[in-house]
Image (tube, rainbow, N blue to C red):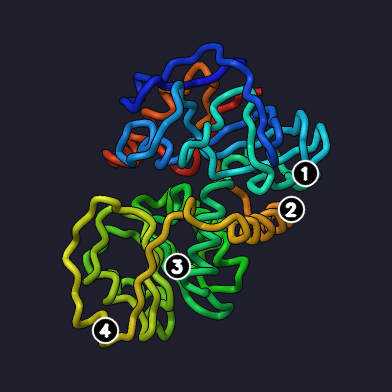
Amino acid sequence: MKAAFVQQAGPAESIQVGELPEPQPGPGDALVRVKVAAVNPIDTYVRGGMIAMDLPKPFVPGCDLAGEVVRSGGGLRPGQRVWCSNQGLLGRQGTLCELTAVNEHWLYPIPDGVTDEAAAAGALVGITAHLGLVREARLASGETILVNGGSGGVGSTVVQMAKALGATVIATAGTEEKRQACRDLGADVAVDYKVKDLAEALAAEVPSFGGVNVWWETTREPDFDRILSCLADRGRIVLMAGRDARPEFPVGPFYVKGASLHGFVMFKATPDEQREAADSINAWLASGEYRPKVSHTFTLDQAAAAHRMQEDNTLHGTGELAGKIVVRIG
C-alpha cells in the first residue's frame, strides 16, 4: 500500500511517500481503507519528536481518518463508512496511508449525507471540543462562553458546539474576515483580540456584560490577567495549548473569583468518553449544527507540505489556516 511515513522522529521534510506492507489487523481491529485524513498540531509534535512516544519503524503519522471498512472481526460490515481519531499515538500507526488497522472501539459511523472531508476534519477537534465543553467546563444552556481564537480548527468547532449546547458565544479573531467567519458559524459576538482592553470592548458589545462563564483558550501563551478581567465569578478556564508555556499566573484574582482551570489532552480520554463525544458529533454533523471547516486540501504525495503548513501555523503564527488541513488519499 502507499503511505507517508518517517523512519525516525524528524522535521516535516523527513516524511517519505512510498510502499509499505498492508497492515494485518489484530483481535478487535478492522481494516479500513482511508479516503481522507486530517492533519493536527499533535501529528507534527509526535512526528518531530516534541512529544516523546515510542514510534514503530517506519512510522505513519496522523490521528484522523474517514474511510470505509474492508474487513472486520467485530460488528462492522464491509463497505461501511467510518471515521476515527486517536491514531498515530501511543505506539499506534497513523492514517496517512491507503489502509490502516484500527481497533473498533475508536471507529464511528459516518452519518448519511456527511462528506469524508467533513468527517475527517471534524474528528480530533470535535472530540477535543466536546471533552472540554461537556466533561471539563460543564457548559450549560444559557451560559456565556468566550472562544479566544474562534476561527481556527478547534476554535471554530468550539463556537459551533457551544451554540448547539445553548450558550451565548463570543469569539475573538484578528481580522474582520475571520470575525465574520465566526459569526457565520454561530457566534453571537465577534471582537478583535488585539484590542487593548478586552473587558471594556465586550461591555460595549454585550448588554449587561457581567463576565463570561467559560473562557476557552486556544493560544500557546495565555494572558491570565486578561482572562480573569473578563471572567464571571465561578468562571471556568479551559486550556488546550501551550505545552511548553510558563506564563505568570495571578493567584489572587483567580481565587477571589472562585475560578477553576481545566487542562486536558484528548488522547488520554477513555474509549467510552470519546464515543460519548462521537455520538454527539454525529448528531450535530447530521443536523448541520456542526460544519467542520476545511482550510487546505493536499494529496498524499504532498504530506510533507501539509505537515510543514500545520507546523508553521501552530509554532510560528503564519496565520495561513482558517480551519483544518485535510489530505485526500482514496
Q: Which residue is mark 4?
A: 255
Name the amino acid, label 4. Answer: Tyr
Q: Residue placed at 57% from the left, 62% from the top?
A: 161
User: Which of the two residues, 248 or 232, is positioned nearer the viewer here?
Assistant: 248
x%, y% of residue 53?
38, 39
Frontmost of labels 2 and 4 is 4
**Disc sitting over residue 1 in the figure:** none
Frontmost of labels 3 and 2 is 2
User: Mark 1 or 4 closer to N-term?
Assistant: 1
Q: Residue placed at 41% from the left, 60% from the top?
A: 264
Dots 3, 2 in contact, CB < 8 A: no
Name the amino acid, label 3. Answer: Ile
Name the amino acid, label 2. Answer: Ala
Residue 118 seen in render? no
Q: Quadrant of the N terminus?
A: top right
> How far, Cα to Cα, is label 1 from label 2?
7 Å
> How far, Cα to Cα, is label 1 from label 4?
47 Å
**Disc sitting over residue 286 in the figure:** 2
> How far, Cα to Cα, is label 4 from label 3?
24 Å
Which residue lies most toward the top here? 19
User: Mark 1 or 2 closer to N-term?
Assistant: 1
Q: Which residue is mark 1?
A: 113
Q: Quadrant of the C terminus?
A: top right
Number of residues whose C-alpha sits closer than 10 Å to that of mark 4, classed few (under 14), some (14–19) or many (20 or more): few
Q: Residue placed at 51% from the left, 16% from the top?
A: 301
Which residue lies most toward the front here? 27
Q: Which residue is mark 3?
A: 170
x%, y% of residue 208?
41, 86
